[in-house]
Amino acid sequence: MTKKQVKQGDKNATSNIVTNRLANETSTYLQQHCQNPVDWYPWGDEALKLSRQENKPILLSIGYAACHWCHVMAHESFEDQETAELMNALFVNIKVDREERTDLDEIYMKAIQLMTGHGGWPMTVFLTPECKPFFGGTYFPVNDHHGLPGFKRVLKNVAAAWQTSNTQILDSASELSNHLKLMERIKSDKPEAESESKMGFASVANTNTINAALEKLQRNFDSDFGGFGGAPKFPHSMSLELAMRACAKSSSFSDSRKEECLELVQVTLDKMAYGGIHDQIGGGFARYSVDRHWLVPHFEKMLYDNALLAKTYIDGYLLTGREYWLRVAEGILKFVSRELTTKQGAFYSSLDADSEGEEGKFYVWRPEQIVEVLGEEEGTWFNQVFGITERGNFEHKTSILHLSKSPEELSRQYTTPLDKLWQTVDSAAAKLLAERAKRIRPTRDEKVLTSWNSLMITAFIEGYKATAKQEYLQSALEAANFILDNLKVNDRLMRVWGMPVNGLDTEGIVKLKGCLDDYAYFIEALLNIASVDGDEKWLNTAEQLCQSMIKYFRDEDEGGFFFTASDHEELVVRPRSHYDGSVPSGTSVATSVLLKLAKLTGKAEYLNLAEEIFSLYGPHFSRMPDQFANLLSCLDMYLFNGPEVAIALSHDDDRDMLLALHQKYYPNKVVAVASEKSDLNFLKDKKVLEKKTTVYICQNFTCDKPVNNLSDLKARLSGW
């Protein structure tokens, strides 16, 4: 523990603040714990070596900056001197930001789930000096409460067991670690596994596989309030995207299946947008809802959720033409531009759930506060529209804003055209947003993650395609160039960029080798940029990074991809990214980019690797198809082989035909803007004809007659 001089109030006044080893970390989450009396270490050689030297167990605490219950446990236990003294005496204490070290989070969360049957954050796990888990849980209260043991009692009992039952603990930890290794394998050692794998591709390469997944989604669908299952409810963007694919005009699913999927999408997107999970004033979505109705959110706002939901709402708009969904998506993009964008054009990670020590305080209102800002007449109307009442629907008689009725119902109720209704709402929301900005804001996690930034780049590109708004394209290009300039080193990607707490290094600090999601998501983002911008660097870099992804992450023995690179530090398990969670699995996005690059380059290697992944995971689809929604979307792309489209722009401003291509919902098409310098097989002979922007629509590298007239192009697209 060290002392740090910190100025307070009068510029000549200083006080000594004791800090631990987290003081030099760039992670906002780790910085939040740098003044704890706990002798925290970041994950690294120093802490691990100390544990081995002293034969002390490790107390590993994993969380993230926007996590409400992480703050609660920190305040109750980690800021408590008595608890800290116990921790320091009995354990080597390591604090990890799960968003930086997703590899560690993946490994030890699976261990917690095996030991307790559930997971979540904060995660508290006890490890042997060899980093093998032997006990743990999530949130522990300071004292015994609601059936949970108090944290101090847990510390004493674990330490005592380490001394008295060491052999049993080590044996148990080894057994658990071996089980974790088995969980990461795709293939089983059972005799039937080999035959399953051999028939894997043949058995899944048909629409029955996707139909089975859609059937399971339908059974779990809440037809009253949208989403899947009961409370708590999370946005499942990947499942919604899969359902939308089934609705596409180009799909071969039955009319009844299309109708079911369309209802699933419509109800879910509407109900989420009406609910309190959606910030009705500032745009963007919270991480999840604690109730079935999407009313009361857990108020943290994550970059990845908003990136995925922006794309989902835009796709919903393109599929159905529902303008309200485009409005919701643009609200997300405006929120991210306003509150989560760095000066350099990259994107921050999240906003905390708490402000002033209370969850949601920044976002909730009382009726009189609204009237004070808007005036009696407009304020009363706004309160009615957004369900703000004297009784309230949240703590302290405050209200979470939500649409009390659908926009169409409100339009009829107030005999106001929809466009006029939205003008009135927007005017009022702007005033309230300005007033809300005067409140103490939730903490912003200011690290820049390659993977999440890549998701947001894709969202802004989709926003540009749908609206032709140049600012969305500019946001995507700035963020992509930031990654290329700061987080790409030769043929490798790094994972995290952050500013040091002392602010002296204006260039920022880059750390941690990229994981599979960093590569796959960024390649996907580059391919999306290449669908609207003709700079050859986007496609060239995408293919270069794809080769690196194959080189460093492919499992040469079983096939598929690991989550960590071959030269990553050795962990108790080398994890994979099998399933969709709050973000799409790295494996599924890697499959997506392999399929797209196969079309753009004509290289069989990429297609073979994608087919290999389908074969590997095929036996699992029938058992849990809903957990592979994004990989099943890739299978849909493979089965319903869409066109490859090249467009040669006569000049950069001539974008009517380009936007016409993108403003039609056809998820399996692959579009690239041709460049005179492009050396990709598919693009190098695609030229401007008659000095007009020219579109080449091809299937399996056989192209139809080029089109350089907008009306002719629209006629062609009408069949899509």
Image (cartoon, rainbow, N blue to C red):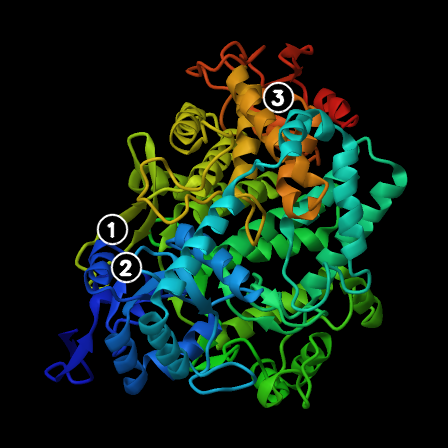
Q: Which residue is mark 2?
A: 26
Q: Which secondary structure lies at badge 3? A: strand
Q: Quadrant of the C terminus?
A: top right
Q: Which residue is mark 1?
A: 509
Marking on residue 463: none
**Would you identify the image quadrant in which residue 86 lies?**
bottom left
Give the residue type at disc 2. Thr
Query: In the picture provided, is 485 more to the left or to the right than 583?
Result: left
**Would you identify the image quadrant in which residue 564 lies?**
top left
Q: Which residue is mark 3?
A: 645
In the rendered structure, are the residues bearing label 3 and label 1 in contact, judged by CB atoms less than 8 Å apart? no
In the rendered structure, are the residues bearing label 1 and label 2 in contact, judged by CB atoms less than 8 Å apart? yes
Query: In the picture provided, is 354 more to the left or to the right than 463?
Result: left
417, above or below 403, in the image: above
Q: Nearer the viewer, residue 366 or 66?
A: 66
Q: Residues within 10 Å of mark 2 (few under 14, many from 20)?
A: many
Whole-percent x and y of residue 238? 64, 47
Q: Nearer the viewer, residue 36 or 473?
A: 36
